[in-house]
Image (tube, grey):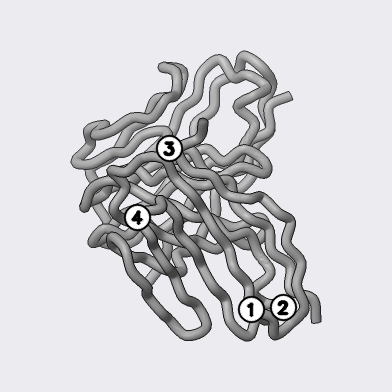
Amino acid sequence: QKEVEQDPGPLSVPEGAIVSLNCTYSNSAFQYFMWYRQYSRKGPELLMYTYSSGNKEDGRFTAQVDKSSKYISLFIRDSQPSDSATYLCAMRRDQGAQKLVFGQGTRLTINP
Amino acid sequence: DAGVTQSPTHLIKTRGQQVTLRCSPKSGHDTVSWYQQALGQGPQFIFQYYEEEERQRGNFPDRFSGHQFPNYSSELNVNALLLGDSALYLCASTLLDTQYFGPGTRLTVL
């Protein structure tokens, strides 16, 4: 069993829709949770960074962490064609520059 | 401010050969991590360098080795290449808990 599970999609939605992306994990030691966006043939770009359980909002993006269920989510409101990319969840145990454990990535397409 | 840079962009090798990939971190970043991303998969951690020492290593064989220089730049070396080593190799540098990724080097092994 993988430490982090993420539905690879692909996911296709119309412009303006609310998008929900999710990951589950098995290691209860994970405390720091991230969402990265990766455009085709590019490196991952950090979108959201959260510590422990709770919600964090940044513009059209909201990250949620539920440690009791070992479940994290990323919501995108008013989705735009420029949001079309692969979204990777990532997590790590400790503070500091420790290794990240990634999900498989979900490929998202926003249709105009 | 330049981001993380990697060279070369693309590389084609044959089985059994050796390859060296290079990474320059963002200015002021002293920690460099390397990841392997197979097609359709998330990145997998190879190892991390800090103060020219390997600080942490993932589940990769000894064929994968690295080095960090005094200016914090880093190299990833892979010996005895296998077809399964074909992937995007990502370098990330760290500042204040956040890892910033470079564009990657796409390695194809024939």
Q: Left or right of A107: which side holds B2?
A: left
Toward the front, the furthest residue is A68
Task: Identify the amino acid type marked 2.
Answer: Pro
Disc 1 is placed on an element classified as: loop
Disc 3 is placed on an element classified as: strand
Q: Nearer the viewer, residue B32 or B59?
A: B59
* Same subunit: marks 1 and 2: yes
Cα–Cα span, label 4 and label 1: 23 Å
- Residue A26: x %, y % from top left: 41, 40
Label of residue B45 in the image: 3
Task: Say which residue label 1 marks.
Answer: A18
Label of residue A67 in the image: 4
- Report the chain holding disc 3: B
Task: Identify the amino acid type marked 3.
Answer: Phe
- Report the chain holding disc 1: A
Cα–Cα span, label 1 and label 2: 13 Å
- Residue B37: x %, y % from top left: 57, 41
Q: Which of A19 and B42 is in front in this view?
A: A19
Report the mark closest to the observer, 4 or 2.
4
